[in-house]
Amino acid sequence: MSVQAFPQTARLPAIHFGRGLAAKFGVVLLAIILLALFSSVEMGVFWGLGMVFGFILQRSRLCFASAFRDMFLMHEGRNMKAILAGIAVATAGFALLMQKAVPDPAAGAFPDQAHVVPTGLYLVVGGVLFGIGMVVAGGCVSGSMYRVGEGYVASAVALLGVLVGLEAAAHTWNWWFQFNISTSPIVWLPNGLGYGGALLLTGVLLLAAYLGLTWWESGRPPMIAFKKKAEDEPVTFQAKIAQSYRRIFVKGWPMLAGAVALGMLNILAFTYEHPLGVTGELATWADRGAKLMALGAPKLLGVDRLAGCNLAMDGTAPWLNHNFALDTGIIFGAFFAAVLASEFKVRFAPHPRRYVQSIGGGVLMGYGAGLAVGCTIGAFFSAIPSLGLNGWVFGLSLLAGAFAGVKIIQRIA
Amino acid sequence: MLDVRGEICPYPMMKAVEALKKLTPGEDTLEVLTDHAPALTTIPWEAAKMGFEADIDEVGSPEWRITLRRSEAPQDPKAVMARLQEKLAAVQA
């Protein structure tokens, strides 16, 4: 490996972490996990789930923002195709779990923990705003979280914007609820189609999306990911173990592996209580902060009847709840993954305007997620497998927003 | 030398493409310094579409120098990526 000195410019006080430190951090994290497990199994398990979540995102660079964005920016659909596969995996598992909760969907009931919310204009507005915001900020909410773990300061700024946007959404929620949300119908596909019909329709739509992407990409060679390390064929036991280590912790994972792993993680989370969601907990943080400045949101109408990442912001909930463990786990998991792969570095944006861009994109994302009851995870990746029509409507709205977002970033130097 | 360290996604790729477009006919090399790992895929790929051959050197942790050279022959992005992998294999062997 040729290592050549580069003239360091003064503007980038880079901070690096070596592997020795990673080991130390590993011990500290293990201690925290054990402590959490000791105090409550729930906390420990969700902390672990969050860590694996962040680890998967960092290793496979599974980025929902780029999945939508690169279709327009680079005519590339490989990231979105992987996500479709992850959704397909989660759909199968979700159907099994929901069937246990609601054996007879024809009666009109729907599982209260699945991410099924009313389908209406508010969802489209939230999706478009979120789509614009995630492209402008350079990552969606979970994407910004894993980039914070990698050391991107601009992504931390974007998350601050998300908190502001979520609180703004809370302050306008009651208007939206009366104007549109309360009158929009909840469309849970198994109610009309049965589980078989709902699964068939979801499968057909996923396949149609896959074929659409393939058509969109056709005429160009599929992008090949650059792999950091080359492989030697291992012979000895030690070499085989070393190879496995490199494959998991050092080399990037194929996006497909990451997306399928995330789909399975989502099933695992749902077996406990509810599917993966990120922004509901962030909304609680935002409102706690706002209350300190006497800017807390009023009592919100109807949120307790909405599943998923709603703006319930239960002020009485303890700080350390399982969603807190999940969200902080994402950042720590990504940090751990980045350090082990020697990809961690505190990166300051080269221009102050990039921070302005990040906070602006973050506010749009936060507002969109607050309004649409979730982000790319809760309202899309967890909603389509919940067999609600809302997941598809939100996804299409994200697509429209991402298109607009690409036009915007192409005009920002 | 184009320094895109610290830039958020997808600016490393966009800035590199912009800089390639601005090269005068006399200039046939552009060096891009990046700390954004996904750019190791996207920059050589997009550059190949514009007729540039790519080379990657790890110059820090995590920092890479991507050297883009104008080529007479049209560049197949797939072939460019394959050559990059081969080079890395040789360096490590």
Image (tube, coloured by chain):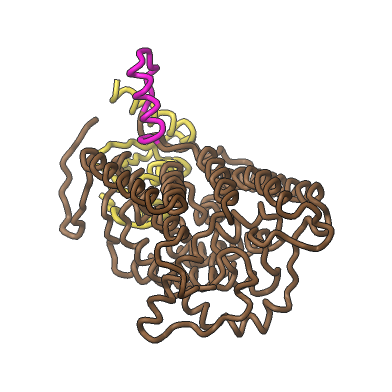
Q: Is residue A65 visible?
A: yes
Q: Is residue A73 left or right of residue B5?
A: right
- Quadrant placement of the C terminus of chain A: bottom left
- A212 or B3, which lies in front? A212
Q: Nearer the viewer, residue A201 or B42?
A: A201
Residue A33 rendering spot, x and y as whole percentages: 36, 47
Magenta stretch: dominant secondary structure: helix
In the picture, which quadrant includes the N terminus of chain A? top left
Number of marks present in the image shown:
0
- Chain A colour is brown
For chain B, give the colour: yellow
Q: Position of residue A71 (x, y in %)?
A: 57, 52
Query: Is residue A343 covered in magenta?
Result: no
In this rendered view, identify the residue nearer to me: A102 or B88: A102
Q: Is residue A235 magenta?
A: yes
Expressed as whole percent of the image width and height from the top left, the position of residue A398 reads: 59, 62
Residue A145 quadrant? bottom left
**What residue appears at the point 81 percent right and 63 percent down from the top-left corner?**
A108
Tell me: B32 left or right of A244: left
Q: Does residue A8 appear to the left or right of A139 in the view shown? A: left
Tell me what residue is drawn at x 32 percent, y 41 percent. Answer: B66
| Residue A179 occupies quadrant | bottom right
Residue displayed at 22% across by 45% down: A17
In percent of width and height, residue B29 lies at: 31, 43
Q: Which residues are magenta?
A: A230-251
Work out whether A376 lies above or below A268.
below
